[in-house]
Image (spheres, rainbow, N blue to C red):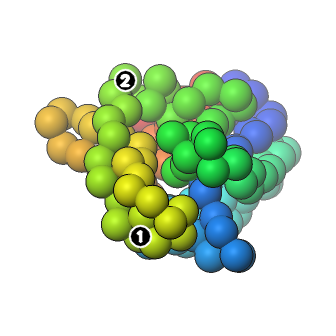
Amino acid sequence: MIPRYKRLEIEWKHFAAGGATCERCGKTRDTVRSVVVELRKEFGPAGVRINLTETIPAKTRIAESNEILMNGIPLEDLLTASVVSTDCPSCDTLAGESTCCRAVEIDDVQYEDLPAVMIRKAAYRALGISS
């Protein structure tokens, strides 16, 4: 597989308070970091640069929490998925109020924390690779 693009900018947004993030974002964090390491090993020899940026939106923008952008394109757009809101008790505790957070839905299956296969597939598409 030869990527069409030589740079992949990944931005992962997650709400945090007091240095802590919610459970679902914590799981996505671990997964996205792991996928980035794998992608760097896979595409580094081809000269592809992969950068991961973590952004913490303000409490007023909590709806953006657990969003992943690849070269500025939302993961759900790359995968033809939809975004839904689900209750997030973990964020309730962090935010100090009842909170709904984003989840991604593909083929009637909701993902509150984003699995590696989904992140990898979106990365391939952002790099111009059909998967």
Q: Residue at x 37, y 23 (%)?
A: 80
- Whether residue 120 is visible to the viewer of this picture, yes or no, is no
| In-image side of 51 versus 120 (left or right) | right
Q: Nearer the viewer, residue 1 or 54?
A: 54
Q: Is 89 drawn above or below residue 118 in the view shown? A: below
Residue occupied by mark 2 = 80
Q: Amino acid at mark 2?
A: Thr
Q: Is 106 drawn above or below residue 29 in the view shown? A: above
The circle on residue 90 is: 1
Q: Is 17 drawn above or below residue 80 in the view shown? A: below
Q: Quadrant of residue 109?
A: top left
Specify the quadrant that holds the N terminus. Answer: top right
Mark earlier in primary sequence (2, 1):
2
Q: Amino acid at mark 1?
A: Ser
The crowd level at tag 2 (other Cα within 10 Å; few <14, some 14-19, many 20+) is: few
Q: Nearer the viewer, residue 46 or 30?
A: 30
Residue 21 point in image, percent of width and height: 58, 70
